[in-house]
Each structure stands twice: as structure tokens, then as C-alpha cells.
Amino acid sequence: MPNIIRILPLIILIGIVDFSFYSTILLPILNPNDWWLKTIFWAIPFLAIGALFFFPRRSQRAIHEPIRRDTHSSILIIYLAKVLGIIFFSVFSLIIGATFGLLDLLNLMALNTSSMYEYLRLIAFGISSVMIISLFWGMYFNRYRYKIHKIEVPIKALPSDLEGFTLVQLSDIHSGSFTRPEYLDKGIEKINSINADMVVFTGDLVNNVAEEIEPYIDSFSKIKSKNGVYAILGNHDYGDYVRWGNSMAKSQNLKNLIEVHGRLGWQLLRDESRQIKVGNSKISLLGVENVSAKGRFKNYGSLSQAYKSSSAADLKILLSHDPSHWRDEVLNYPDIQLCLSGHTHGMQFGVELSKLLKWSPVKYVYKEWAGLYKDGEQYLYVNRGFGFLGYPGRVGILPEITEIRFVRAVG
């Protein structure tokens, strides 16, 4: 009964949307032979409502249910594609109807719109089909299709000991979303094949709770580098998106997650720094807890505290999960040459065509959302994420392993 009450508003919304579309848009133009279209139209919302009943509630126990999650996502994709097609048809029907009606009213042209509506219906069906194919392709072929992004970061007066120093960045693992551990292991093999001097992870190890990472500890503990693996926490690691019975349970979850980093062999930086010697040179690696310039995310970190624990170094790198932190505060620390972030996932949806085109809807929320950015002599790199959240796939924006190589700036 509580489950029905919880989803009742969604059921009502689906009913209103579909009945409105059907009665005002589709019914007037459907032919008697379009019974198959009526069947498909009404079958999709019933599937969507069924998925709402059987999809697990979001709680600390709603984890590792790949069949339910993928089934729910598949039905949602079909439903959204149908709605998109109907919206397209509705908008252009209104535009064409108004235009043709005005021309007819002015006695400029007498037109029959029935053939135009047939073309619009085909186009709307095509748009829905493309959306369905793209989202299913992203879900079943792209979510574990790890891409290595090779980046060179030029640093002024970089010592010879640090020229060619290679750092691998991972971000946003979201282990609670994984369904195919064998594909995950292939990604980890790719990471180790780089033979990095250092590996860093910039937050969101889990979706909600520490136990999500348990089945994958053996896999992620295989990640190695010459100078260790370092990590910070992301906004999802604090358990803020779970209904906890009490504050002690939430606090214990965070303690468990911190302990997991030790079992992985990763050094967790919580508003602190590590000094790493490379030959006669030194890297100061700073890590802050989650800090965001976006009001909807809680702030836990202190850059000033992390900075106090650092020391003069030939290269100073900051790990900060949310890229909005860079422009909001990090640029006030000019000796931090590079900030590494994640968080955006590139929205797991967009278009990237080499250097010619890079677009995702998330660019309208985050100015820096994927790739390398520069302000003066300071750099920010935003990783597109190793895992996925919400939509269990990726369209256009593939899961990322970043290989950063430091070089001496010319001039």
C-alpha cells in the first residue's frame, strides 16, 4: 500500500499526459487501420506504470539489482521516446495548422493539410526510433566502453625529473550501478597498461552506501602505480541521498566507506596533502572533501585547511570533485597549477567529434564540464567519469580514463 501511495502522483501524471495526447492530437487523425498504433500507444504507459511498481525503492538496500534496473530503464527509454515523438508532432502540427489556416483565411492559398500530417507522423516516428536506438545502444554497448583520453599539461619551469611524469585520473566510479564485473576488469586492465607514475581518483566511489563497493574491492585493489593511488570523496559518498533511520547510521556508513579506501590500498585525502618525491623534485598533492559553488550540493571541504598542510613544491596538484570549485575558489591559489575534478559525467549524453565539436546539455549548468581548461597559468581537467548513474549507459560521452603527461611549457 505505501508503494502505491508513493507512485500515485506519477501514475496520475502518466495518465493525464497520455490521455491528453491521445484525445487531442492522435484521435482526430488516426485511420481505422491504425489499430496497431493505438495498441502500441497504450501498451507503453501500462509498461511504465508496471515498472514503477516493481522497481526497488531508493534506499540503502536498493543495490545490485541489475535486471530490475535495466528493465526499468528500458521501459523508461521507450516511454520518453514516445513522448518526444508526440511533442514534436504536436508542436509542428500547431505551427503548420496555424500557418495554413492563416493563408487560407487571407485567400492566398487553399491547402490540404492531411498529407502534411502524414509526413509529420512519419518524422515523429523516426525521431522516436532514433532516440530509442541511441539510448539502447548507449545502454548495452557504451557503458563499459572505456576511452583513454591522453592529455599534455605544459608547466612553466618544470624540472627535468617531472618531464613526462604520467598521472592517471579516474572519477565517478558509482559502483552501485555496475552490472557486468567482467567488463569492469577490462577497464582496470586498461588503467594498469598505462604504467602510470601516479593514479588519482576524484570522488563518488558509490551511489549511496558503502556496501555497494564490496563486490568490486578485489578488482579495484588491482590498480597500481609507481607512487601510489590517492583519492577524495564526492557528493554521493556522504550518504546524503538515502533515508537513514538515524544520524548514527549515516555516520557509520561514512566510516565504512573511509575504511574501504584502506582496503583498496588507496590513500584518502580529507582536506590534507601528501608530498611526493620524484628524483630531486617534489609534487604536493592536495585533496579536499566535497566543495561546490552550486547551492544544491552540500559543502564539506576546506581548501585553506588542505593548503596549510602542503608545502612549496615544483608541481602542486589539487583533487576537488566538483569543477565549479575551481573558478569559485581554486584560482585564488595561483601556485596550484592543476586541479582535477569530475562530477558532471558529461551528463552521459552529448556529441564529441575530436576537437571540432564538443557538446552536452550539462554545459548549460557547468561552464567547465569535460576536458582541459586554462586560466592564466592554472589548469582544470574535468574527467567524464568511469561509471554511470541514473541512465545506465552513455550516448556520445564515453566512460573515461585520463592519462595526463606533464611537459615543460615553451616560452
Image: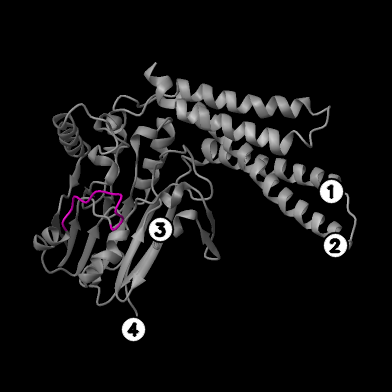
Comparing marks 2 and 1, which lies closer to the viewer?
2
Instruction: From the image, tell me which residue sits under label 2.
Output: 106
- Disc on the earlier residue, 1 or 4: 1
Give the alpha-carbon distance from disc 1 to disc 4, as whole Å. 66 Å
Labelled pair 1, 3 in contact (Cβ < 8 Å): no
Quarter of the picture containing the C terminus is: bottom left
> Which amino acid lies under the numbered mark 1 shown in the image of this protein?
Thr
Which numbered marker is on residue 411?
4
Give the alpha-carbon distance from disc 4 to disc 2, as whole Å. 69 Å
Relative to 212, does residue 101 appear above or below in the rendering?
below
- Disc on the earlier residue, 2 or 3: 2
Give the alpha-carbon distance from disc 2 to disc 3, as whole Å. 50 Å
Comparing marks 1 and 3, which lies closer to the viewer?
1
- Disc on the earlier residue, 4 or 2: 2
As helix, strand or loop, the secondary structure at mark 4 comes to loop
Q: Is residue 361 magenta?
A: no
- Disc on the earlier residue, 1 or 3: 1
Comparing marks 4 and 2, which lies closer to the viewer?
2
Towards the viewer: 122 or 258 = 122
Instruction: From the image, tell me which residue sits under label 1.
Output: 113
Comparing marks 3 and 4, which lies closer to the viewer?
3
Give the alpha-carbon distance from disc 1 to disc 3, as whole Å. 44 Å
Instruction: From the image, tell me which residue sits under label 3.
Output: 369
Residue 288, horizontal then vertical, whole percent: 19, 54
Residue 119 visible, this orientation: yes
> Which amino acid lies under the numbered mark 3 shown in the image of this protein?
Trp
> Which amino acid lies under the numbered mark 2 shown in the image of this protein?
Leu
Relative to 286, does residue 80 appear above or below in the rendering?
above
Describe residue 175's horizontal placement relative to residue 334 as left or right. right
Q: How many marks?
A: 4
Instruction: Please report the bounds of the magenta region as a residue range.
Output: 293-302
Q: Residue at x 26, y 29 (%)?
A: 211
